[in-house]
Amino acid sequence: MTTLFRAGLIGALLATSTLAGCASTYYGAMEQIGFEKRDLLVQRVTDAAVSQENAKVEFANALEAFRAVVNVDAGELESTYDTLSDAYDRSEDKADKVRARIKDVKGVARDLFREWNAELTEYSDVGLRRSSAQQLAATEARYDTLVAKMDKAAASMDPVLAVFHDRVLYLKHNLNARAIASLGAETAGLEADVADLIAEMERSIAEADAFIAEMRAGS
């Protein structure tokens, strides 16, 4: 089985991993087709890296959209808001995917290290057990460094998203203020229409009262 095919198959299976009844059943099924936890961990780390790269691109695009706001013409405010809002939404979506990928990495790593540690007791050869335990410790140390960097990168997204969110929200409220202000003329027209309607109703009521009075006078 080629590396490319294995990676593609793992990716497809990972996409449906949330449908697995439980972790042990899922891992068992994966092992039956030749995918150990270490394979899954490598693939999920790869996926996390890809999602971070995608997020970086979206953040860069959102930044360009944000810079465009600086020189925006008043008449272009709405289209600029739409552009920036879409850029923010895409950035937020990519950020969510980064967090999800990192969560997946941590889940597989936790299960892998737990299994590895439990299996140390199965060694009858003390020397091999010691060597495996040392390898486990070294692998955990490398993993801790990796996941710390991932967490730091993920955490750095939040302040940027907060800045974008504030600007998008401000533009939205600016548009809202203009929309409300533009209702002034509409309100004036509405008041005139209502005044005319009330006057018409009053005339109609007066006609009705006059008619009733005449009817009573003639009875």
Image (spheres, rainbow, N blue to C red):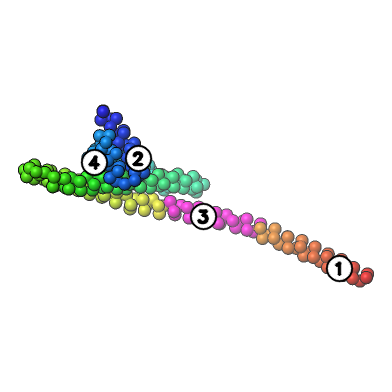
For the residues labelled 4 and 2, say whether their Cβ atoms are less than 8 Å apart: no
Q: Of discs 4 and 1, which sits in the foreground?
A: 4
Q: Identify the element where label 2 is drawn.
A: helix
Q: CA distance from mark 2 to mark 1?
A: 80 Å
Bounds of the magenta segment? 168-189
Q: Position of residue 40 (x, y in %)?
A: 26, 40
- With 66 as the anchor, is 124 left or right in this view? left
Residue that mark 1 sits on: 212
Q: Earlier in the sequence, mark 2 or mark 3?
A: 2
Q: Main secondary structure of the magenta part?
A: helix
Residue 142 visible here: no
Mark 3 nearby-residue class (10 Å; few <14, some 14–19, many ≥20): few
Q: In this picture, is 213 found above or below 2?
A: below
- With 26 as the anchor, is 199 left or right in this view? right
Q: CA distance from mark 2 to mark 3?
A: 41 Å
Q: Identify the element where label 4 is drawn.
A: helix
Q: CA distance from mark 3 to mark 4?
A: 53 Å
Tell me the amino acid under the disc marked 4: Lys
Tell me the amino acid under the disc marked 1: Ile
Q: CA distance from mark 4 to mark 2?
A: 16 Å
Q: In this picture, is 119 found above or below 7?
A: below
Quarter the N terminus occupies: top left
Residue 176: in magenta span: yes
Q: Quadrant of residue 199?
A: bottom right
Q: Quadrant of residue 3?
A: top left
Quarter the C terminus occupies: bottom right
Residue at 34% from the left image edge and 44% from the top image edge: 20
Q: Of discs 2 and 1, which sits in the foreground?
A: 2
Residue that mark 3 sits on: 176
